[in-house]
Image (cartoon, rainbow, N blue to C red):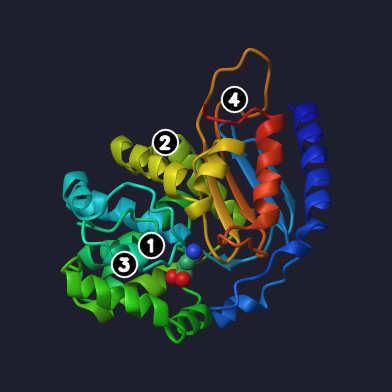
Amino acid sequence: TGQTQKWLQQYVDDWVAFYRKRTNDGDVASYIPALAQADPDDLGISIIGKSGMTVRSGDTDMSFTLQSISKVISFIVACMECGVSYMLDRVDVEPSGEAFNSIMHLEMQQVEKPFNPLINAGAITVGSILPGKTSDQRLEPIFQLLENMVGYRPKLNVDVYESERDSSMRNRAIGYYLLETGFLESDLNVTLETYFKQCSIEVTIDDLANIGMVLANDGMNIKTGEAIIPRQIARIAKVLMLTCGMYDASGKFATYVGIPAKSGVSGGIVAAVPPRVRDEPMPFTDGCGIGVYGPALGDEGNSIAGIRLLRHIANQWDLSIF
Ligand code: GLN
């Protein structure tokens, strides 16, 4: 109701203002030059509930690129195109405990496949499996799924794509390693181009909230009533987000926040809060999707202010899935 909405809005406004002031201990990603232009003080959040109730606060109109958040989407698409068991034979679903761009674990003799689809090695492998000869053909179902989730067809940010492509030594190293070990299913250059492009798709926090909402509802778009992701695949996506979504800070995030979420080095976070039963009246008990943007990152490559804000709200509103 209007009263609740007003109260929630005031609450979120206050905490966005509070956490924005404390971002000065993080840094924007600079290893991709185009991302270094972001303003480290920006902070915004969008929360969309099942009933349509929406709370938006802070820097709500910024566009930014999906970066690693795209890995969830490409994995879902690959599962839809090639089948879950085919994919799980080729990428594992275990946290790596290493940084997102680590090549270290690939060298270990006993590794039979990349640890999970949300680290770079796994995501690049997924990109090599997507059907299509060219990177644009492989991206088409990714754009299509995004359109079904957010309601319009997002655009590629060409500046970020080129910047990413031209500063991609580490990802190329990972790619060559995957090629050598036989993990890649198709041409390395097309695969890397697919990966750089999927990372460079531009979104807003409202888009992320809508994506979170679809996942929270096991693949159903509440606005259109359409089942756009099979339930089993949406569930695996949430498992991966919970166990691997915040890289080597995933355990801490699950402990202190307790929501399936995925971050990207542009500063975005998507979170999926499923419906939950509570004795006390709590906001958004019928589930919600949350999008956050805060480009100042901590050591693990996650938005510092974004995580603090999410943690605060999750604790106050008892959003944890546990
Ligand atoms: N494009 C980035 C990279 O490959 C994505 C990493 C991220 O968002 N953590 O380095």
Name the residue: 60% across, 52% down.
206
Ranked by sequence position, the earlier of labels 2 and 3 is 3
Q: Secondary structure at mark 2?
A: loop
Disc number lying in front (4 or 1) = 4
Ranked by sequence position, the earlier of labels 4 and 1 is 1
Disc 4 and disc 2 in contact, CB within 8 angstroms:
no
Instruction: Name the residue that disc number 3 marks.
Output: 124
Disc number lying in front (3 or 4) = 3
- Decide if residue 67 is in sight here: no
Mark number displayed over residue 285: 4
Q: Secondary structure at mark 4?
A: loop
| Mark 2 → mark 3, Cα distance in angstroms | 32 Å
Q: Quadrant of residue 165?
A: bottom left
Q: Horizontal and vertical percent for residue 115? A: 31, 54
Ranked by sequence position, the earlier of labels 2 and 1 is 1
Instruction: Name the residue that disc number 2 marks.
Output: 225
Q: From this view, report whether residue 228 is shown above or below residue 269.
A: above
Callout 2 amino acid: Gly
Disc number lying in front (4 or 2) = 4
Q: Nearer the viewer, residue 88 or 77?
A: 88
Callout 1 amino acid: Phe
| Mark 1 → mark 3, Cα distance in angstroms | 17 Å
Task: Work out which quarter of the rendered image holds the N terminus and state it.
Answer: top right
Mark number displayed over residue 143: 1
